[in-house]
Amino acid sequence: KNEVEQSPQNLTAQEGEFITINCSYSVGISALHWLQQHPGGGIVSLFMLSSGKKKHGRLIATINIQEKHSSLHITASHPRDSAVYICAVSTGNQFYFGTGTSLTVIP
Amino acid sequence: DSGVTQTPKHLITATGQRVTLRCSPRSGDLSVYWYQQSLDQGLQFLIQYYNGEERAKGNILERFSAQQFPDLHSELNLSSLELGDSALYFCASSVFSSWRSSYNEQFFGPGTRLTVL
């Protein structure tokens, strides 16, 4: 049983498109994290949120605690956004990770 | 550059051996987290230290151990290595110990790629 489910697994978009990646979780959480992993392997934390919405540049993350669901949106996608996006939740003493969404943005 | 350093970058060793991975957190960060990323299991949380003390434990095997030293660097020791231990090992650091605060963002190191032959 996966505590964190992401969809879609793979996503191909044209440059400029609006992209949405979804994350659902089944446990009570302290916070939800969105991570970005580039082909070289490095991981960057994009957002950590426990309620509402956060925006950073072209990236927007939202969370609905009642529905146990979060979305990551990328506006005006660019080839440099190509990466694996991973949703994770922390419960107070444990982290659970989704399997990631592989995004390819074509010029 | 996140400010978190990990050494070595790559490590190739044989089954049954013991290795030590090292992590230096960002200046000012007191928490260190260790993660394992393998092809079949994905990312898994191993353990967290805060200011020298164990704060939380995840899916860390008994063959693995970690510690955080007074200068806040951390080491992950992997012993009796098996083929299945081949993975990328990441450490991350954050300022606080809390898992709840949305201001306690984690910064990841570049990882150590361990290959067990």
Image: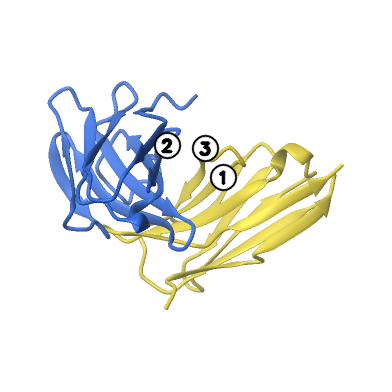
Chain colours: A yellow, B blue
Q: Who is closer to the viewer here, A22 or A103?
A: A103
Q: Residues within 10 Å of mark 2 (few under 14, many from 20)?
A: many
| Circle 3 Cα neighbour tier, 10 Å, few/some/many (<14 / 14–19 / ≥20) | some
B116 and A102: which one is in front? B116
Does the CB distance between marks 2 and 3 fall below 8 Å?
yes
Please state the chain letter of the residue tagged with numbered disc 1 in the rendered image: A
Q: In this rendering, would A77 be left or right of B92? A: right
Same chain letter for marks 1 and 3: yes
Residue A59 spot, x, y in % from top left: 65, 44
What amino acid is found at the position of numbered circle 2 in the picture?
Answer: Gly
Q: Quadrant of residue B45?
A: bottom left
- Element type at mark 3: loop
- Residues flagged by tags 2 and 3 on a common chain: no
* Residue A73 position within the rendered picture, expressed as x and y whole percent measured from the top left: 68, 53
The amino acid on which the numbered mark 1 sits, given as a three-letter code, is: Gln
At mark 2, the secondary structure is loop
Point out which mark residue A36 bears. 1
In the rendered structure, the residue with mark 3 lies on which chain? A
Measured in 3D between alpha carbons, the distance from the residue under mark 1 to the one under mark 3, in whole angstroms, is 8 Å
